Structure formats: C-alpha cells, structure tokens
Image (cartoon, rainbow, N blue to C red):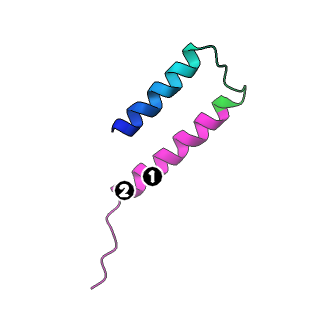
C-alpha cells in the first residue's frame, strides 16, 4: 500500500506543479479501467482445480 500511496503522491505533486497530461489521457485511463475490470472479474471466477 505504501508504494501505491507514493505513486499517487508523485502524480498529485506533478499535477499541482503545473504538469499537463497529454490530451489522449482520457483514452489511456479508459483502457486502464477496462483492464482493471477484466482483472477483477478474473479474480472472482473459481480456479480450475485438477486432481
């Protein structure tokens, strides 16, 4: 968790310091959201158990 908090802090510092993300950031964020949704769905599925 501390690594995630550190990354969020770095992002916030950059944005508050005047950094402007590229115009296509919305597309990138949408792709990230889709990937995270797929990961969450995969984690909810029961694992195949071979005996």
Q: Is residue 35 left or right of residue 6?
A: right
Q: Is residue 51 left or right of residue 21?
A: left
Q: Residue at x 66, y 24 (%)?
A: 21
Vertical order, 12 against 41 (above or below) = above
Which residue is rendered at x = 56% and y = 41% of the image? Answer: 32
For the residue pair 23 and 40, the one nearer the viewer reads as 23
**Residue 50 drawn above or below residue 43:** below
SS at mark 1 in the image:
helix
Q: Residues within 10 Å of mark 1 (few under 14, many from 20)?
A: few
1 over 40 or under it: above or below: above
Which quadrant: the C terminus?
Answer: bottom left
Image point (57%, 21%), residue name = 14
Q: Point out the residue furthest to the bottom here.
A: 51
* Secondary structure category for the residue under label 2: helix
What kind of secondary structure does the magenta stretch mostly adopt?
Answer: helix
Question: Is residue 44 found inside the magenta-colored segment of the image?
Answer: yes
Magenta residue span? 27-51
Pointer 1 with pointer 2, Cβ within 8 A: yes
* Nearer to the camera, 2 or 22: 2
In the picture of the structure, the residue carrying the numbered disc 1 is 39
Query: Percent position (x, y) of residue 37?
Result: 47, 45
Task: Name the residue that disc number 2 marks.
Answer: 43
Q: Is residue 12 magenta?
A: no
Where residue 29 appears, as percent x and y from the top left, is 59, 34
């Amino acid at each position: 968790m501390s690594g995630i908090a550190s990354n969020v802090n770095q992002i916030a510092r950059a944005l508050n310091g005047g950094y402007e993300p590229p115009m296509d950031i919305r597309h990138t964020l949408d792709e990230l959201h889709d990937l995270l949704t797929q990961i969450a769905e995969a984690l909810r599925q029961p694992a195949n158990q071979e005996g």
